[in-house]
Image (cartoon, rainbow, N blue to C red):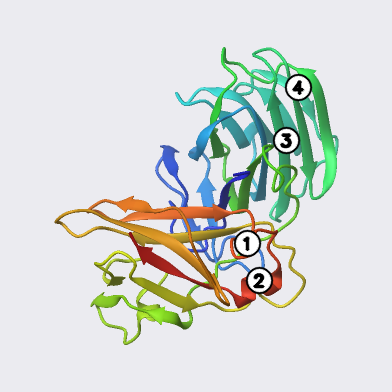
């Protein structure tokens, strides 16, 4: 796997990705203040001193991070935009906006050493796409590149990027721990790549995260409806945010439900990755597993089986390539796909 995290908060759930809430209470998924990036419906707003750690599936030393960031006007000094964190909440370093000069800066630790800046101020109250390549070669040497709106603004080579005695990055910080008067950051279209493998192994660049929810029955309907009955299996599982007040279920291994999804929004789409996202739980007795399932034509591919607990959990699987063809995704392939789940 090369794509590690993808999130646009389009489910309406502020905890859509594996995340731990840090700092002061606050932060919410919003549709206004600011208006999300088209065609998004939601974005995540984090006021000053409200920040979150996004857990990576494994420790990394070489990462690409993209975040669309909306800095709402404030005053003060530097405030984290993207931070690189170890598994004990220690900060290797951070990419931040300094509200005094409106430049993007790279710092060792939590503003311990200013290693360089973008040289060009950014505008407030507008969306910017920030791409960061953060590479730790040792505890005293690393490389960092920063793009702002598709223009490279920072290129640091063989600088001391970490304030820690280890080189393992386990979490990405979004939001700021600083008390910047009147400020907030909003985030959209967040993604993280590592550099392993043939796909999604470099700069992510400008792009959008689009949620495609079930809109009709697929080729197979074997689950039964539970909770509030909406009249169809597909409409039991397309609410935002997800809720177990209406659901579908299967008991026998091999049982499956498939659903049609809408086409991608109009325009040209270069699809980097697709991710199956679902909420599930097991019955109080025994245990159950579900595998996300993608179907296209005669090909039906089951993803990794997930053992469910007796409480609801959000699960995901990233597909760097189209599993029905084993080649990179195309918009035609996405539009022709059906999605669902299979009981294991």
Q: Nearer the viewer, residue 164 or 5?
A: 5
Of labels 3 and 4, the one closer to you: 3
Q: Residue furthest bottom?
A: 231
Of labels 1 and 3, the one closer to you: 1
Image quadrant holding the N terminus, namely top right
**Label 1 to label 3: alpha-carbon separation:** 26 Å
Q: Position of residue 111 (x, y in %)?
A: 64, 23
**Label 1 to label 4: alpha-carbon separation:** 40 Å
First in sequence: mark 1 vs mark 4: 4
Secondary structure type for disc 3: strand
Q: Which residue is mark 1?
A: 322
Left or right: 241 in relation to 124: left
**Label 2 to label 1: alpha-carbon separation:** 8 Å
Contact? badges 2 and 1 (CB < 8 Å)? yes
Of labels 1 and 4, the one closer to you: 1
Looking at the image, which residue is at 52% across and 46% down? 47
**Label 3 to label 2: alpha-carbon separation:** 30 Å
Looking at the image, which residue is at 57% across and 45% down? 182
Q: Nearer the viewer, residue 78 or 264?
A: 264
Q: Which residue is mark 4?
A: 115
**Label 3 to label 4: alpha-carbon separation:** 15 Å
Q: Position of residue 12 (x, y in %)?
A: 46, 63
The relative height of residue 187 versus residue 153 in the rendered view (above or below) is below
Q: Which residue is mark 3?
A: 133
Looking at the rendering, which quadrant does residue 305 occupy? bottom left
Q: Residues within 10 Å of mark 2 (few under 14, many from 20)?
A: some
**Label 4 to label 2: alpha-carbon separation:** 44 Å
Q: Which residue is mark 2?
A: 333
């Amino acid at each position: 796997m090369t794509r590690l995290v993808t999130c646009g908060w389009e489910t309406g759930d502020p905890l859509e990705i594996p995340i731990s809430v840090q700092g002061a209470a606050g932060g919410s998924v919003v549709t206004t203040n600011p208006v999300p990036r088209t065609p998004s419906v939601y974005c995540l707003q984090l006021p000053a001193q409200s920040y979150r750690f996004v857990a990576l599936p494994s420790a990394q030393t070489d990462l690409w991070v993209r975040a669309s960031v909306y800095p709402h006007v404030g005053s003060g000094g530097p405030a984290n935009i993207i931070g690189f964190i170890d598994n004990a909440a220690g900060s290797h370093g951070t990419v931040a906006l300094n509200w005094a000069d409106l430049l993007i800066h790279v710092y060792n630790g939590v503003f311990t050493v200013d290693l360089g800046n973008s040289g060009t101020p950014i505008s407030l109250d507008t969306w910017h796409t920030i791409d960061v390549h953060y590479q730790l070669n040792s505890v005293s040497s690393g490389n960092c590149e920063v793009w702002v709106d598709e223009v490279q603004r920072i290129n640091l080579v063989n600088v001391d990027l970490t304030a820690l005695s280890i080189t393992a990055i386990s979490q990405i910080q979004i939001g700021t721990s600083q008390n910047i008067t009147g400020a907030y950051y909003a985030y959209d279209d967040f993604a993280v790549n590592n550099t392993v493998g043939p796909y999604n192994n470099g700069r992510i660049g400008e792009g959008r995260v689009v949620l495609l929810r079930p809109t009709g029955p697929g080729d197979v309907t074997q689950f039964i409806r539970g909770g509030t009955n909406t009249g169809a299996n597909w409409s039991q599982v397309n609410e935002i945010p997800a809720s177990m007040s209406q659901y579908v279920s299967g008991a026998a291994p091999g049982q499956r439900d498939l659903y049609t999804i809408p086409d991608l929004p109009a325009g040209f789409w270069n699809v980097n990755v697709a991710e199956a996202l679902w909420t599930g739980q097991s019955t109080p007795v025994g245990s159950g597993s579900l595998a996300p399932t993608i179907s296209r034509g005669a090909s039906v591919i089951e993803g990794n089986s997930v053992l469910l607990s007796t409480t609801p959990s959000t699960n995901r699987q990233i597909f760097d390539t189209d599993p029905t063809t084993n080649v990179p995704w195309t918009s035609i392939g996405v539009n022709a796909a059906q999605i669902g789940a299979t009981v294991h």
